Image (tube, rainbow, N blue to C red):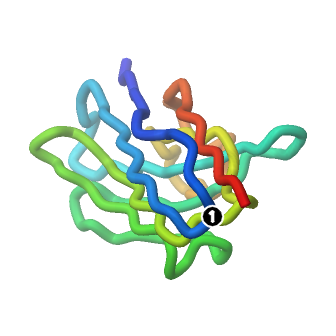
Amino acid sequence: QVTLVESGGGSVQAGGSLKLSCAASRWWSNSNSVAWFRQAPGKEREAVADIYTNSGITTYADSVKGRFTVSRDNSKNTVYLQMNSLRPEDTAMYYCAAGLQFNCDWDLVRCYYYWGQGTQVTVSA
């Protein structure tokens, strides 16, 4: 079993920045994909970014490219999401996910075994 704990959420004004953290109780293989998703009230959960913890290869949703950066610190089993130039439409609960199933797409909710409890991000205009 893997436990994921997110932190770093909060309230900021548009144009501001936040850095989220996702701490894993352990890595479960030599190649781990850890993703960030978000869910706004009344909307479906959507993928934001993904990183492979061994190679550092990243993928981003078009809506956050150039503004968000995902990174990792393997010594701490932690993945980060640096969010800059925040917009009101970025307001959502942010979740990290891990345990990507084999041959499954990184941006699909159903493809992940493990989820954190979420951290709220609120961006005011």
Give the residue pinned by disc 1.
14
Give the camera-side residue of 2 and 76: 76
User: What's the amino acid at mark 1?
Assistant: Ala
Q: Residues within 10 Å of mark 1 (few under 14, many from 20)?
A: some
Could you tell me if residue 105 is visible in this image? no
Q: Residue 101 at x, y = what percent? A: 52, 44
* Residue at point 72%, 43% (across, down): 39
Quadrant containing the N terminus is top left
Quadrant containing the C terminus is bottom right
**Residue furthest toward the bottom?**
66
Give the camera-side residue of 23 and 29: 23
- Residue 65 as seen in the image, left or right of residue 26: right
Q: Total label count? A: 1
Give the camera-side residue of 99 and 72: 72
49 over 91 or under it: above or below: below
- Residue 24 as seen in the image, left or right of residue 75: right
* Residue at point 59%, 71% (across, down): 64
Could you tell me if residue 95 is visible in this image? yes
26 over 62 or under it: above or below: above
